[in-house]
Image (cartoon, rainbow, N blue to C red):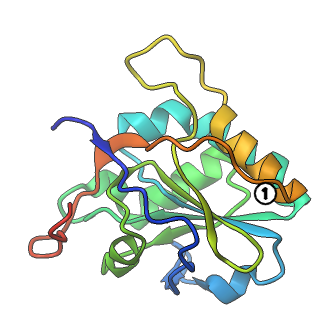
Amino acid sequence: MPARQSRMLPLGTTAPEFSLPDPAGRLWSLASFAEADGLLVAFLCNHCPYVKHILDEFVAFGREYGPRGLAIAAINPNDSSAYPDDAPPHMARIAAEKGFSFPYLIDATQRTARAYEAICTPDFFLFDAERRLVYRGRFDASSPGNQVPVSGAELRAAAEALLAGRPIDSQHPSIGCSIKWKPGNAPDWA
């Protein structure tokens, strides 16, 4: 299946509520991150080559920006019955192996992915302290098929601007694997 581009939810959109478990069963919601100066909601999965391509640098991004007040909620929206590599035990293994400093949540109903209008993995949504959308798009210009090094430059620039109270200049759609919707769950726009 060809790569998909993110939908680019309108800037200023309020972060949709969610209540999702991590693989250990702990529930996380927007309120779990209430003290953070910003919140990055990242739709990821285990098997997508686009996610695998950036994952180490994304984990480094989390370690760098978490202590600076940016919370991260990584969400796996894929149908794990059709894509077993995305099942919760594998999510827990990947998070442990890579040293995630943020929760990796299971969107089993796919309602959260629909609410955020996520369309691919990876897909990033950065919200300010009031949980208004200030950035949506890609990690950087790298992809599995090009020679651009993985740096997270675009998401880093957005995070720096957010934490400094400056406007975010550049926004490009993310490109990745389509979300693997359960039968009957795919929205019309997917």
At numbered mark 1, what does the secondary structure look like: helix, strand or loop? helix
Q: Total of numbered circles in the picture?
A: 1
- The image quadrant where one finds the C terminus is bottom left
10 Å crowding of disc 1: few (<14), some (14-19), many (20+): many
User: Residue most toward the top?
Assistant: 147
Q: Is residue 110 visible?
A: yes
The structure residue drawn at horizontal position 25% and vertical position 65%, both measured from the top left corner, is: 79
Q: Position of residue 162 (x, y in %)?
A: 78, 57
Q: Position of residue 84 (x, y in %)?
A: 27, 56
Q: Quadrant of residue 125?
A: bottom right
- Viewer-proximal residue among 69 and 90: 69
User: Residue most toward the left?
Assistant: 184
The structure residue drawn at horizontal position 66% and vertical position 28%, both measured from the top left corner, is: 151
The structure residue drawn at horizontal position 54% and vertical position 65%, both measured from the top left corner, is: 11
Q: Amino acid at mark 1?
A: Leu
Taking the image as shown, residue 53 lies to the left or right of residue 165, namely left
Taking the image as shown, residue 187 lies to the left or right of residue 166, namely left
